[in-house]
Amino acid sequence: MSVTNALYAQSGGPTAVINATAQGVIEAARAARPRLGKLFAARNGILGALHEQLLDTDAASADEVAGLGARPGSAFGTARYKLAPFEEDEREYRRLIEVFRAHDIGMVFFNGGNDSMDTALKLSQLGRRLDYPLACIGLPKTVDNDLPATDCCPGFGSAAKYVAVSTREAALDVAGMARTSTKVFILEVMGRHAGWIAAAGGLAGNGFGEPPHIILFPEVPFEQEKFLARVRESVEQHEYCVIVASEGARYADGRFLSEAGGTDAFGHKQLGGLAPVLANMVRESLGYKHHYAISDYLQRSARHLASATDLSHAYAVGEAGVKRALAGANAVMITIERTANQPYAWTPSSAPLEEVANREKELPPEFITDDGYGITEAARTYLQPLITGEAPLAYRNGLPVYANLDLPEVPCRLPPFK
Amino acid sequence: MSVTNALYAQSGGPTAVINATAQGVIEAARAARPRLGKLFAARNGILGALHEQLLDTDAASADEVAGLGARPGSAFGTARYKLAPFEEDEREYRRLIEVFRAHDIGMVFFNGGNDSMDTALKLSQLGRRLDYPLACIGLPKTVDNDLPATDCCPGFGSAAKYVAVSTREAALDVAGMARTSTKVFILEVMGRHAGWIAAAGGLAGNGFGEPPHIILFPEVPFEQEKFLARVRESVEQHEYCVIVASEGARYADGRFLSEAGGTDAFGHKQLGGLAPVLANMVRESLGYKHHYAISDYLQRSARHLASATDLSHAYAVGEAGVKRALAGANAVMITIERTANQPYAWTPSSAPLEEVANREKELPPEFITDDGYGITEAARTYLQPLITGEAPLAYRNGLPVYANLDLPEVPCRLPPFK
């Protein structure tokens, strides 16, 4: 049997540390020679595999590979692309096998979140289906932290740190000027389906009246009167109110608050933005001066403020993926297993992709205070280690040095895919 | 003549480095003993002076004072409060003199932006008017960088660095996923009247097609068709388009774009937010998937990403203010004078408050490219040194250590002011 080559692909939204996983895969693959042949990186994730756009990672020097961990965004490009079920359309699957066969690819490392693990699962079943020796290992990555079976998801810790730090900084700003100016500040954060990132905002304070005074979770049905009463209470007690709101905040009937926006000057339906909806509520009912920030992509690309713990998780899942694949694993996702809280300890492990794909892990009820607006000690115990440690960057001219890795494409051996 | 005491007051919106100016004032005042007596800090700016809420800075240890430079937000509280003209209402002015007399205050260091320099000017004229020996020195502070007579304003360099870094990070995120997902990303930044902060976003790239692809300045009238054509061109050429937009972007007739928002679901007028207006435009006309972030207070409180140059400016204006006051100065604002670009060199200087108060410095036309969407080399030469250098913080449990300085209030000697 010839030496097998491998393919690494990024999928879904990037994170601040996704390329540390790429670094882990590449370094582990190089260390595994000659048991493993070449390692290709797919351009734009699964699309690169379909269209035979394969990048040759051998072209990168050891220094360039080591620099990957310092670069946010998808170094090789990513994709949001869902394969149709095999039963409905076999064309794409057959093409993938053709590409893999043409380049002697026997292992795929698929780096993504919920939807991506579904693709990874399909790939892992493909070999048996189409009689081609193929293993697929899922490498977790999502700022949303909502993959099951793993203690946490690489990417989340850094987004969490960004949100906690930003909340604390903005809260200091508002506290100092609340007497005569802004009294209510809203920070809108990601997490359409689960409140993990919003919960991390809670780390900005130590509870007991410290900001944030209110956290809005998707897991807790939004009640307008109760919310406004709480805002008023906070302003009366502390002079100001800092709110961290998950974009997924919703009413009891499931409607997102962000869908409550009306029409713009042209009569067009106004697109989301939860923060302005909350801000309008506050203004109309309480009359307080308010401001809001929307973190959006900043929170998931802020490599300058990455968590060292998160960065090492991201690297480890890449490295462990290669090792497990070489040991014969297939159809598993690498996980982070927490072995101790104090001091925090962890080890990479794995779980069957069947148990991971298309499932979401919500924030557990015991992480949310009884009033629905804060995080408990259990949540702090869980979250704290994930934002701990700094991962400083080199700066040049006042900006972090984010090296671009321009890898050559491997010559195509197949006709284009249509 | 008894030894004179002094008062330091913060005014207007805080910055990431405003307390470095407080540190400069306190350390210089301590070094000037016994020529200078006590230094008080006003709680909530001019309000503290009116209501005799004076904090005793002597209660802070040298270490605590040194820690001020690492704390964003107003350490002693600030205020947005404009004194009525003396001719219209003398009451507040007479009260201020009563408070100053009661505490033997002969010098005021007033730390703020445009409106605050107007207050500083009024205070500087008060001594002669009411026959009380009083000097007032303005200490510049504004992220908007729009004070005249000074090369730059402490606070701006850090906001500029935050916006440049955030733009670069978000651009890497978008670039990697543009093929199948978000193609247009908008970052809304501060600067209602001047495009200094938006211009700083331009430092994220080196021009020549690097993001940001479009900058919207208040100084350049917004033309919708031209803007949309440019967005399309960028997406067709680079696969994506990153836009840095000043909240002050406006039409030729002066209307702010952010006022184009319509009504919400309840029929209430929707409050601003330039980014959603631009996003709707892009969606309606071009159909591209888009995302937007609104930096709001994050950009002016992000001490974790402060510019070392900016931090040293902030300290220097405080220190220089005390020295000039002791040398007999009155009615001046301390300025930053640039003495060389390459390598960058500067020195504190001063300008008459008369020339500063109530004036705004726009971005010069030669800083904006001919097409109105980018920054020129002249702008880069000006901006680059201001974001250069890092000012790292100590971290504990994953968060920067921002010490709160709880100073005791000096006992009141006067009846309350009504």
Image (cartoon, coloured by chain):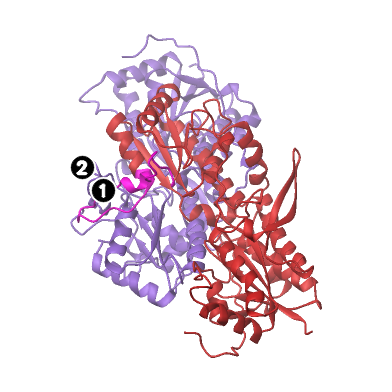
Chain colours: A red, B purple
Q: Residue furthest front?
A: A87
Name the residue type under label 1: Gly
Instruction: Tell me if I can see residue B301 in this picture.
Output: yes
Q: Could you tell me which quadrant the C terminus of chain B lies in?
A: top left
**Does the magenta segment cover residue A268?**
yes
Q: Which residues are magenta?
A: A247-276
Q: Is residue B114 above or below residue B157?
A: above
Residue A298 percent location from the top left of the image:
49, 54
State the residue position of label 1: A262
The structure residue drawn at horizontal position 65% and vertical position 31%, both measured from the top left corner, is B63
Residue B92: which quarter of the image? top left
Residue A382: which quarter of the image? top right
* Residue placed most toward the observer, B366 or B155: B155
| Marks 1/2 same chain | no
The structure residue drawn at horizontal position 25% and vertical position 50%, both measured from the top left corner, is B261
- Which disc number belongs to residue B58? none
Residue B7 percent location from the top left of the image:
46, 25
All told, the count of numbered labels is 2
State the residue position of label 2: B267
Asked whether disc 1 touches disc 2, contact meaning CB atoms under 8 Å apart, the reply is yes
